[in-house]
C-alpha cells in the first residue's frame, strides 16, 4: 500500500487537496493532506519564530506515524521545501518525491528563491526585520494569484474559495535556508509539469541540451517527468487527472530525459561553412570585421539564456554566434557578439544594461556606421528586444528575433515587467522586424511568438517572418539541412537589406 503525503504551497492548507485525496483513497491508497503550522485550521500555534524548520518537524511527526511501506511525498510550490527537508532526514521511509509544478531547491536555498513573482521577491528581500505582529505575509487578492502561477482551468468558485480560505504565510518559512545532507538526492523523483504554467517535458529537454551543468541531475535514471495540461493549481483545476498522475508517479512511470550526446547539441558546427574573419575582443564584446573601407553597418547578436556564469564556452564562443558574426562580416557588415549577464530569470534588468552598453561601444567605434545598426535576439534573449521596440532610435534600422521568446512564460514571474515585446511592438512604428520561426518549436515558446505576431498585425507593425517548417529551437547547430541554411541566408539578407536601404 502507498501513502501519499500531500503538502501544498504558501497561504493554503490541507483543505486544498480534498478532492485529490478522495480520488487516491478510492484506489486503496492512503492520503494525508497536510496542514502545516500557521496554515489552514492550524493558524493559532504559529508565532514570529515559525519557520521552515517548524514545517519540516510537522512532516517528520507525520512520517513517523504512517505505517504504509511506501511513502510518496508530494510538494507543491512552497511545499517542496519542507518535503525535501523531511525526506532528507527519513530517506529510508520515502519511496519517491513528487515535485508538483515546482523547481528543485538545493542546500542553502530559501523558499523565497523559487517564488515566481520577482517583484514580490525583491520587496521581501529588502523588507526590514519583522516587528510586533509584522511576521506574516498577507495572501494575494482574488486577482493576484496569477502572479504566483497560471490560474488556467480553476473554476471561478474554486478560485474564490482559494482567496477566501487563504491565510498569511509566516515570513521565516520563506526566508530560512533549506538544509540538506545529500541523502535526499538519491531518492527517486518525479516532476509533474503543468504546461499552462509554462513547463513541459519538451522545454526541460531543450534546457538540458543547452548544456547547463545545473540540469545534469535531471538526466539520471531515478528522475522522471509527467505532464498535466493545466495551470499551477491542478488540485483545484484537474483533481481527477492529478490523482491519476500521482498514482502513475508512485508506480515509477514517466518520461526519462536523455543526457546531451556529443554531436547533437550546441557544440556542433554552424550550418553554413563560413571562412574565418578577423575578430577583436573588447571586454565582453567581440567584433568581426569585414574587408571594407570606411564605416560599415553593424549587427549586434544577443544570446538567450539563462546561462550560468561558469559555463564554458560562453555564448559568444559557441559555433552559432561565431558563425553569425563571421557570416555578416563576409557580406561587408560588422558582426558583433557579446556575453551578457542573463544568468537567472531575475537578471533581465542587468542583461539589458549589458546589451545597451555593448551597443554604445559599437556605435562609438570609428569602423562602424553609428547610424546603421541592427539588433538580433535569440531564444529567451527575445524578451530583451522589448526596450528597443518601445522607443526605437533613428539609428536602429532593424530588430530581428530567431526562435524567440516574445512574452514571459507564466511561471517566470515577469508578468508586470517591462520585458514584454508582445506589449511594446505597438510603439515600434515603422521599424522593420524580422522573425525567424521554427516549425518544431516548443509549444510554450511558439505561443509567445503567435501572441507577438497577433499584436504586430493589430498595430500594423512592419514584420517579416522567415519560416523554417522542419526547424528546431537552436536549428543552426542542430538541423544541417538545405531548408535551414536557406532560412539563415534569407533572414540575413532581410536584416542587411534594411541596414543598407
Image (cartoon, rainbow, N blue to C red):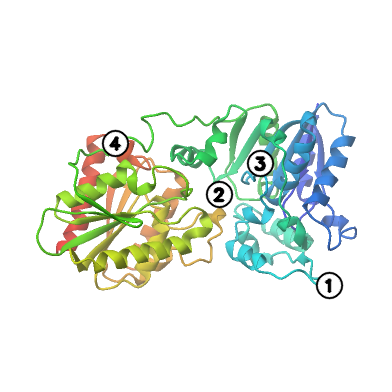
* Quarter of the rendering containing residue 3: top right
Cα separation, mark 4 vs mark 1, equals 61 Å
Element under disc 2: helix
Q: Quadrant of the C terminus?
A: bottom left
- First in residue order: circle 4 vs circle 2: 2
Q: Nearer the viewer, mark 4 or mark 2?
A: 4
x and y percentages locating residue 4 in the rendered image: 77, 36
- First in residue order: circle 2 vs circle 3: 3
Query: Quick check: 298 left or right of 192?
Result: left
Name the residue located 61 percent from the left edge and 46 percent from the top edge: 103
Taking the view exactly as shown, the residue that stands out farthest to the left is: 293
Element under disc 3: strand
Residue 196: mark in rendering: 2
Q: Can residue 122 be spotted in the picture? A: yes
Residue that numbered label 1 is attached to:
132
Q: Nearer the viewer, residue 10 or 219?
A: 219
* Quarter of the rendering containing residue 500: bottom left
Residue that numbered label 3 is attached to:
99
Kindly check if marks 2 and 3 are in contact, taking CB atoms under 8 A apart as contact. Answer: no
Name the residue located 48 percent from the left edge and 57 percent from the top edge: 408
Q: Nearer the viewer, residue 380 or 263?
A: 263
Element under disc 1: loop
Residue that numbered label 4 is attached to:
269
Amino acid at each position: 500500500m502507498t501513502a501519499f503525503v500531500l503538502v501544498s504551497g504558501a497561504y493554503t492548507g490541507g483543505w486544498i487537496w480534498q478532492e485529490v485525496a478522495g480520488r487516491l483513497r478510492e484506489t486503496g491508497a492512503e492520503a494525508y493532506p497536510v496542514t502545516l503550522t500557521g496554515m489552514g485550521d492550524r493558524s493559532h500555534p504559529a508565532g514570529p519564530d515559525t519557520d521552515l524548520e517548524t514545517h519540516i518537524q510537522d512532516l517528520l511527526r507525520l512520517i513517523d506515524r504512517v505505517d504504509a511501506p511506501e511513502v510518496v511525498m508530494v510538494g507543491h510550490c512552497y511545499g517542496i521545501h519542507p518535503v525535501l527537508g523531511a525526506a532528507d532526514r527519513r530517506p529510508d521511509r520515502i519511496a519517491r518525491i513528487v515535485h508538483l509544478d515546482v523547481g528543485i531547491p538545493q542546500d542553502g536555498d530559501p523558499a523565497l528563491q523559487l517564488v515566481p513573482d520577482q517583484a514580490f521577491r525583491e520587496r521581501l528581500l529588502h523588507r526590514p526585520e519583522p516587528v510586533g505582529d509584522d511576521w506574516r505575509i498577507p495572501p494575494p487578492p482574488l486577482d493576484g494569484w496569477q502572479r504566483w502561477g497560471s490560474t488556467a482551468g480553476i473554476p471561478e468558485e474554486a478560485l474564490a474559495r482559494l482567496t477566501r480560505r487563504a491565510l498569511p504565510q509566516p515570513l521565516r518559512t520563506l526566508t530560512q535556508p533549506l538544509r540538506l545532507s545529500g541523502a535526499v538526492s538519491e531518492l527517486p523523483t518525479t516532476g509533474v509539469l503543468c504546461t499552462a504554467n509554462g513547463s513541459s517535458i519538451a522545454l526541460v529537454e531543450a534546457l538540458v541540451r543547452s548544456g547547463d551543468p545545473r540540469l545534469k541531475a535531471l538526466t539520471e535514471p531515478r528522475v522522471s517527468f509527467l505532464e498535466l495540461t493545466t495551470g499551477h493549481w491542478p488540485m483545484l483545476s484537474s483533481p481527477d487527472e492529478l490523482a491519476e498522475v500521482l498514482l502513475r508517479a508512485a508506480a515509477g512511470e514517466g518520461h526519462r530525459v536523455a543526457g546531451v550526446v556529443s554531436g547533437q547539441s550546441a557544440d556542433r558546427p554552424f550550418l553554413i561553412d563560413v571562412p574565418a574573419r578577423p575578430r577583436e575582443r573588447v571586454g565582453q564584446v567581440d567584433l568581426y570585421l569585414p574587408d571594407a573601407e570606411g564605416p560599415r553597418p553593424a549587427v549586434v547578436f544577443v544570446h538567450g539564456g539563462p546561462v550560468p556564469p561558469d559555463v564554458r564556452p560562453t555564448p559568444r564562443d559557441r559555433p552559432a554566434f561565431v558563425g553569425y558574426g563571421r557570416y555578416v562580416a563576409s557580406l561587408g557588415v560588422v558582426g558583433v557578439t557579446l556575453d551578457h549577464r542573463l544568468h537567472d530569470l531575475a537578471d533581465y534588468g542587468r542583461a539589458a544594461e549589458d546589451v545597451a552598453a555593448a551597443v554604445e561601444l559599437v556605435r562609438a567605434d570609428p569602423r562602424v556606421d553609428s547610424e546603421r545598426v541592427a539588433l538580433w535576439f535569440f531564444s529567451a534573449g527575445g524578451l530583451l528586444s522589448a526596450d528597443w521596440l518601445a522607443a526605437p532610435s533613428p539609428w536602429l534600422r532593424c530588430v530581428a528575433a530567431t526562435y524567440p521568446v516574445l512574452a514571459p512564460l507564466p511561471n517566470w514571474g515577469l508578468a508586470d515587467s517591462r520585458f514584454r515585446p508582445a506589449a511594446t511592438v505597438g510603439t515600434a512604428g515603422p521599424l522593420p522586424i524580422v522573425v525567424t520561426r521554427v516549425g518544431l518549436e516548443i509549444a510554450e515558446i511558439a505561443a509567445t511568438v503567435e501572441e507577438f505576431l497577433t499584436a504586430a498585425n493589430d498595430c500594423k507593425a512592419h514584420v517579416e517572418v522567415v519560416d523554417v517548417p522542419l526547424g528546431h529551437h537552436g536549428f543552426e547547430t542542430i538541423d544541417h539541412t538545405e531548408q535551414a541554411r536557406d532560412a539563415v541566408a534569407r533572414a540575413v539578407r532581410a536584416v542587411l537589406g534594411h541596414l543598407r536601404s
